[in-house]
Structure formats: structure tokens, C-alpha cells
Image: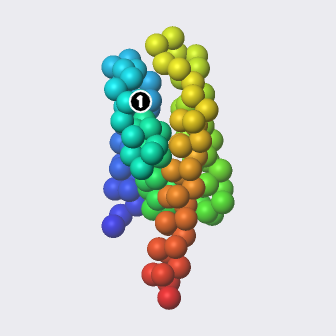
Amino acid sequence: MNKKYYRIALLLYFIAISVLSLNKFNSNKSLNNITVVSIRGDYFFHFLAYIPMFILGKLSFDIKGWILLIISLLISSSLEIIQYYVPYRAFNINDLLANCIGVLIGFVCCITVTKIISK
């Protein structure tokens, strides 16, 4: 597939993640009462939401994996840190960890699939 389409998908992904992270309507605490495998629902969904970041970035740009990993971690961390300054949102270190773990899992998945395909 053309890198142009991956870049459009990455842009739409960033917009969706940004809107969901900073959305005033997303500030309800309903996910705090849900658990998935003994993990609070909001942490689980933070984790899931950030898995595609590295994968879409790798498909969109010809950047070395470790540079893209650092960029992805900075973006996922920045979006959580910004919430500290938004009056109706709250910074949560567990959300930050879930974001970073999601990026790392995306990194591992992408590297693993790339090695399997190259063989």
C-alpha cells in the first residue's frame, strides 16, 4: 500500500487519540469501575489505544525503529502530561504507564512481524 494512505491513517489516529485524551465528555469515571483481567478498564483502554502508534508510524515513514520508538513514547507521554494543565482532566501516572506500555507492545509486535516476513 502507498505510504500516503498510511500517513493519512496516522494523522487520523493522532487526531482521534488527541480528541479522546482531551475531550471533556471523556472525563466521566465509568471506566474506573470496569476491570479487565484485574486491570481497571481505563488503563486497559489506554494500553490498547497506543499499540497502533508505532505500527502506523513505521508503515508511514522510513525512520529507524529506535528513533520512532522514542518519538512515539514522547507523543504518548506528552498527551498524558498535557492533561495536567487541562482543568477538566487529570494527570494519572498509571495512564502514562499504560500509554508507554502500549507503544512498547506495538514496537515488539512490529519488529516481530517484520522479522517473520523478512525470513
Measured from the top left, where is residue 104 in percent x and y?
57, 55
- Whether residue 14 appears in this view of the structure is no
Q: Write the residue at 57% across / 24% down.
A: 91
Q: Write the residue at 61% across / 63% down.
A: 65
Measured from the top left, where is residue 117 in percent x and y?
45, 81
Q: Write the residue at 39% across / 46% down.
A: 36
Figure quadrant of the N terminus: bottom left
Taking depth in this image into account, of 1 and 41 the one nearest to the observer is: 41
Task: Give the residue at the far bottom of this rendering.
Answer: 119
Above or below, 83 relative to 118: above
Q: Which residue is mark 1?
A: 32
Task: Give the residue at the far top of this rendering.
Answer: 87
Identity, as a three-letter code, of the amino acid under mark 1: Asn
Above or below, 54 relative to 90: below
Above or below, 104 relative to 35: below
Taking depth in this image into account, of 40 and 43 the one nearest to the observer is: 40
Measured from the top left, where is residue 10 in percent x and y?
41, 48
- Whether residue 51 appears in this view of the structure is yes
